[in-house]
Every structure is written in C-alpha cells, then in structure tokens.
Amino acid sequence: MRMSEPLRKTSGNRLTAMMQVRNEAGRYLEQVLEELSDFVDEIVIVDDGSTDGTARLCRSFAKVTKLVTLESPLFSREWELRQTLWELAVSTEPDWLLSVDADEFYEEAAKREMRRLIDQDVYDWVAFRLYDFWGTTTHYRDDEHWNIHTKHTRTLVRYLPDYHYFTPRMNHHVPRLPLSYAALPGFLAELRVKHFGWVLSPEELRHKYERYMDNDPEGRWGSLEQYRSILDEHPRLVEWQERRG
Amino acid sequence: MNYIIFSGVPWDEYGYKRMLEVLPEREDIVFTGTMTSLQQEDSGIRALSLAEACTLPAKEYTALVSSPYWLQDVLAFGPAFIIALLERCPEGEDVNLWDKYSGLLAAKADLVGTASERLFLEQLLSRSGVVYLSGDDPLSYGMIRRGERLYFLADFEAVWKKALEELWLPPDTDCPDEPWAEIQLRHRADYYLSMCGKLPQQPTVHYLAASYLYLLGDGRAAELLTKSFELMLLHDYTDCLHSHYRFFSAIGAKRGNLELAVRQYEITAFTAEEKALSAQLQRWLGSGARELVQAELYRVNEDSAAAIRLLAGMESLEAKSLLLLNYMDTFQWEKALRLQQELDSMTAEPSSLMLFQGSGAIASVLLQTPVVEGTLQLLCGKRHAAIRSFLRAAGADQGARALFAEMADLEEAVGRLRGRTADEDV
C-alpha cells in the first residue's frame, strides 16, 4: 500500500494519453500519435471496430502500450465506449490522463508546458481551448453554432485511485472524461488545441451531417440547428495564428 | 414533574405550547415573564417574574430554555435539568453571538430539542440527547390523558415524552427498550428513503437519507451518498467535494475501513493544514494507532459526537489532546478546561501538546484558553474575573476591544430578551 507517497505529486508524474479511434487510417491519426509520443509516457487506445488499417498503425507506435479492438462498434452506445476506454486507461496506473481525439493537436506551447501542468499539487484537472478547424487546416470556425473555443474543455486530469468516477449513461454526447472531475479544483489554461475533425470536403460534411441526423433525428442529444449548420455554405472562418516565441 | 419556561418571546408567540401539553406527568409549570389571567387559566401555566421564579426550589424543576441569552439566569437558578430548545437565529439578532451562546446552552443542557432539521443534524454530530421536534409521519405513536383531554402523539412527541421521562427515571438496563434517539433516527431515515423513491433525481433527499443511515451505522449510507454525489454532478452543483467526500471518509471510518477512509480524506486535503493532517493520519495508520485515525476522521467530518465517544475512554496524551479539540468544537468548554489542566500536568511544558497534532488546531486551542475561561466566568456571573481573562487573552494588542464588545452585545441581548418577555423586569 502507498504510505509515503502523497496523492498529489509535484514531480515524477506519469502521463497516459487515452483515445478512441475508428477508421482513422489515411487521416490524422499517425501525426497525432507521433506528436503524443513526444510528450506522454504511454498511449492507450480503444479501436471502435475499425475496418481499415487503424489497429496496425496504432501498434506501430512504441508508446501505444494497450490497444483494445472492439468487434462491433459502440458508436451508438457512447457511454459504454467511454467506460471501456476509461477502464483501459486507468489500468496503466497513471498519475495523469490526457483525453485526445484522433484529430486533435496540442499547440507547441501546450506541449512545452505539459510537465509543468501536471507536476503540481494544487489542481486536479486542466482545461484547454479547443478550436474547430473547418474545411482547411488554416482556419477555424467562429460563429453562433461553432464557438467551443470561447469556453474551456477539460482534457487533462489527475487520476485519483479512490475517487468515485461517474459518467452519465447516455448514448450520445457523453463527456469525454467522468463528470466527477467537476467537483475537484482545476486550472483553465490559455493554451490551445487544434481540432481537425471538421477539416472535410463539402461531400464529407454532408455525409457527416446525415450520420448525425440518422443517429439523433429529434435532437435529443444535441441541437438540430447546429446539425443543420454543418451544411452552411458560407461559415464564418478565422485564420489561425501561431504563437510567437 | 415541575417545569419552568425561559422563553425567547412573549407567551402568545411561544412556539412550544403543544410540546407543553404533552409533557409527561406535568405538575407545576411556570412561565418566566408575563401572561394574562385568562392565558394562565386556559393553559394551566402560571406566570412569575424572574425574581419570583428564582425563589422556587430549583432542584424540583426542569428548565425549558428557548433563548441562549437566558443562560446566565438559568445557571444562576440551577434547575434539576436543563432542556435547550434551539432555534435558528431570529431576525435582528447577531448570528455569531446567537450561535455561540446556543452552542454553550446546548453543551450545558441535559437534553436538546429543535424543530429545525439542520440544527437537529448539527447537534447530533455534537452530542447525544438530541430530539427533533417535528416530523412527517401522519400516524399516531401513543396518547396521553390529562384531565378530561386525550392527546394523540405524533412520532416526535412520543420521543419527546420518552426523553423527558428518562431524565428523571433512567431506563432499566436489565431489559432495555430501543433507545428513543435510535427510534427517531430510524423514522427520519425511513422517511428520506421513501422520499428517494418519490424524488429519484433529488440530491438533497439522498444526502439526508445517507446522513441518517450513517448515524444509525447502516451500511446503505455509502450507496445513498454515492447517488447524491452523482445527482449533484448531473445538476451541475459542483461544490460538493467537502460535503460528500469528507462524508465518505467518515462512513469508511465508521465501517472500520480506515485505509480507504484516509485516502478519501486525502482527496479533499488541499490546504497546508489539511495536508499535514493527512500525513499524520498516514503515520498513525502505519503505527497501528487506528482509533486516533478513526476519531480524527470523525472530527474533520464534523462528527465530534462520534469522536468523543471513541476518545473519552482513551488514556494516551495524543487521544486526550484530540478529545480536547472535540470538546472545544462542541462548546463543552468546562470539560475542555479540565482536560487541558490534566494535559498540562502530564507534559513537561504546555507547548509540547502542539507536537502531537502537526497542525495549528491544538496551538489555536491553547491560545483561546483565556477567552474560554472568560466566557464561562461571564456565564457564571463573575464579570470582573471575565474581564481579567479577556485582558489576559488580548495581551498587549487591541484584541480586548472585540471581547469587550461581545460582552456588551451579550448584555444588550439579555436586556432585550427580558424586555420582550416581561416589561417589568427590564
């Protein structure tokens, strides 16, 4: 039993990245894994029934220490998928967990600060500003329906072994990390994450819109207006500016 | 049985008239203050001024005290028993002064009653002998006949009656009934468990169910608390780490799962003092001092009553110093002073007490000693001795001013109280 080591360490923290993937070959997964390999200690992945070479790609990275491939996808039972990933991630006995999507990139400043963010005993989670890039990797969308960057999104959390982790049992729009972190002290970092999930051609956008509408035709889990805005012909786009220094 | 009422309000506003009707074996009942002849005739209660009341044979009377500002007079009267009827601070009174003297009144009382569930739970965590004077059960739990009148008793009235009877006639230990305190806890737990079924999305009813189950030592407390925690998060009430996680650690402590309980406490430990206590708990666990761990987990979850029950029989210096903290927290200041003297005689120098805690708690208690002495002297009518103690507490700085201001505030509050209940006594 841990007797001498405090629950919250100010040095030597191990960071595990956790991600769920599905048919990511040929997109951003390889680049994401390369970047993660530079600043995390381990990567755990749940492959939600990919039918392409995603699993093989994941296995090619030394830091991917755990990979679970689901025979049938859990996309429509998101709670179960999140839970499966959570259990896999905590089985690595991490000090901290970073929840990453297969199309998310932490900006350089965020990667540089990552160790400082976790080697402290004051707060138990860190939230970043996520930017939805739209159609291109040079511009993000900023309008009424697409403004997630105006708030912070919690993606980096300390793992406290005896804490009660609660995730709502919903089929869609389940938070990526347990809600229980909301009760713990956290830090809102002015550091940015690029999300390339919407860097899609008009045809791909229409396909994604149809998938959303098929899964949630009455807007029970999300806003129908937002779903419809996926098809906006002239979304408001803002050019991304890298930080200097 | 004879009773004397020290009310915070005039007779026509007195909120415990029904509780007086169902007093067991009532004989002479005196209201300290003024009542009209008709009021006296209707109620069967006679009114006496404070000066007149003081001529009664005090040891034949039980005092029902519903304002903390009567405490000096009640102590001077010296009744056989004191029943504190606690209320939330009324509008217009200083809340800090009211709460402090309510705490002191409760500590001096043989029985505490309150119609506020919040105060009821707070008092249950401070001492034994607490009755809730309200309830939600529509059934009758007994009856009482007085003259030609028959009174059907609600659950809490039956408990009130039993608790009062046991003041004069302690229960037969050879064939004990279920203790009245447990009966009441069970009623409250059953009520909130049924409410959880009716309001499955309501975090507070789950929390209250968990609280009563915890007090009963029922293992379902953790399950209900978990549900409450989840509902808090779903409702975006995120300020629940201390309220829920400290409570989890107390539940773990009660069940003897101290390793888990200490780790749960550590989740809530952020300040330097909390971290130091967390490290101390680990050291005690490592050295096998499990009762100290258990007692401290109770105390930091504000369950001093459970901590005191555990520590009262222990002889070690550490146990006694923890007991001292709990006496201080629950306004049992006479016991605290006696214990402190005992501790001083056990250690070479008073400051060595501080070494045990590793936190500022004991040091803070030692600093407060003259204030505690002064307050108790004030309650016993030793005004000059109290002033000397307050001056000693203040030392060379200007701290005495606050203590004297509190003294003046108390005197003013007592004056207002006497004015309200009996104009001629002002």
Image: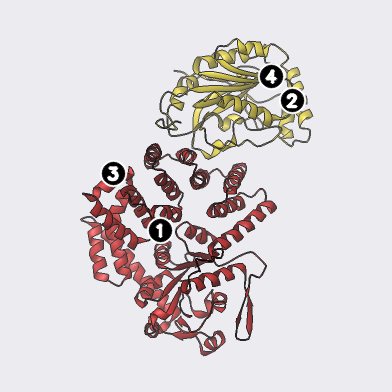
Chain colours: A yellow, B red
| Side of B319 where B23 appears, left or right | right
Label 3: chain letter: B
**Front residue (pair B241, B134):** B134
Mark 3 and mark 1 lie on one chain; the one further toward the N terminus is 1
**Quarter-wise, where is residue A48 in the image?**
top right
Which kind of residue does numbered mark 2 sit on?
Answer: Leu
Disc 3 crowd, CA 10 A, few/some/many (<14, 14-19, 20+): few
Give the spatial CA distance, label 4 vs label 3.
59 Å
Which kind of residue does numbered mark 4 sit on?
Answer: Arg
Give the spatial CA distance, label 1 vs label 2.
65 Å
Relative to A91, does residue A163 appear above or below in the rendering?
A: below
Mark nearer the viewer, 4 or 1: 1
Mark nearer the viewer, 4 or 3: 3
Disc 1 crowd, CA 10 A, few/some/many (<14, 14-19, 20+): many
Residue at label 3? B355
Residue A22 is labelled as 4
Q: Residue at x 58, y 62 (%)?
A: B183
Residue at label 1? B330
- Quick check: do tags 4 and 3 share a chain? no
Give the spatial CA distance, label 4 vs label 2.
23 Å
Residue at label 2? A231
- Quick check: do tags 4 and 1 share a chain? no
